[in-house]
Image: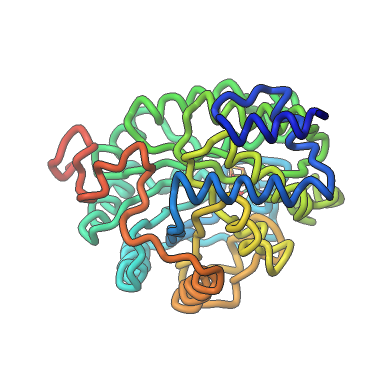
Amino acid sequence: MDLFEEALAKAGENCRELSFEDIKALLGAGESERPRLYALADRVRSRLLGEEVYLRGIIEFSNYCSGACFYCGLRSGNKGVRRYRMEPSEILEAAGEAAGMGLKTIVLQSGEDPFYTVEILTGVIWEIKKLDVAVTLSLGLRSPEDLRAFKEAGADRYLLKHETADADLFARLRPGTTLEDRVGSLRLLKRLGYQVGSGGMVGLPGQTVPAVARDLLLMRDLDVEMAGLGPFIPHPGTPLGGSPAGSLEMTLTILAVARLVLPDAHLPATTALGTINPRGRGLALRCGANVIMPNVTPQRYRSHYSIYPGKTGIDRDPFTSVREMRLLIESLGRSEGTGYGHSPKYAYTELHSGRESGVRSQKPE
Ligand code: 5AD
Ligand code: SF4
């Protein structure tokens, strides 16, 4: 038996025992082997997480960023971006609209923008929690004190992608920061009681198959609750503007292998995948993914949150984006998740979305 067949058989018996060598063999699946890999990932998803697809409404509330990541259109050095910041009242209005459409998770995402102080953000989180939703933060690096305060205000989850587990590539693409520090922040988030999402990009220039295998092993080691894996898409206003994009096939393969390595993690069908291929998200939901993140940012801001060019959905309003995702779920014969969509590891909190996992239940002053 060749290495791929051996690894696939092992995954079919006990995914949790896949080794570095097994993972590399699965990632190397040839065209004729991929359908069986996808089918196994789909079965594992169905067995452990069921047919429900969870919607997470994402509000991109500020595109200011002090970071200088080589791949990202929001990097501070990109002068071609019109920067915006939403007022807390606008964020709450968008969150209210999303909750009104029945979404049970609100994701607050921004560049690394110190304008939003811990006081502003805890106030926003506190108000959003009144809508009976789970709150996910995706704000980049913040101080341990801030992270603790957000948790106490009621935040449930935090997304902080490690981006690449190749330390040299990480240092080249994120000048002034290290993989070690980022992993340290992820471990801190776990200790603070957040459900943690990590992930990275597929097809970064210089990324190798062993590096992707290490991405998956790092996330297994961190015991993440979610893994966001989408294709790299070159942005002309960045140093990587001339590099090729990650491919649909490679992204689907990595997603399928991620489902096997992280069997009970939430895996989103990413907007980036929907951007490189109009059928991308539907295909992802059939090879391991179980989450979609409709954009509920007010339409007037959307085109400016230009992490990469051509982002799908910037011409839509929140209602259209959510409806479109619901139609996609229906067309696949799946159902929309009805609860908060917490990690199965935190299933007990499905019963209520309060601040029960916070240390304190008083409104922070
Ligand atoms: N292509 C695809 N995804 C990107 N991201 C940043 N730049 C790009 C790009 N050019 C992703 C990163 C980051 C999030 C803000 O967006 O994974 O975590
Ligand atoms: Fe800023 Fe995040 Fe983009 Fe880096 S990836 S430039 S931290 S928004």
Tell me: 332 left or right of 36: left
Return the x and y of residue 301 as percentages of the image width and height: 52, 69
- Residue 356 is at least partly visible in this image: yes
Q: Is residue 68 visible?
A: no
Give the side of residue 132 with respect to residue 74, left or right.
Answer: left
Q: Residue at x 49, y 59 (%)?
A: 60
Residue under the point 41% across and 65% down:
336
**Residue situated furthest front in the rendering:** 1
Q: Position of residue 160 (x, y in %)?
A: 51, 39
Q: At which x and y percent is residue 27?
A: 75, 37
Q: Please state which of residues 336 and 11 is positioned toward the viewer in this rendering.
A: 11
Along the line of sight, the residue nearer the viewer: 251 or 149: 251
Q: Residue furthest left?
A: 362
Residue at 49% from the left image edge and 72% from the top image edge: 330
Compared across the picture, whether 266 is left or right of 305 comes to left
- Give the x, y percent position of residue 303: 61, 69
Q: Quadrant of residue 13?
A: top right
Task: State whether residue 94 is above or below residue 272.
Answer: below
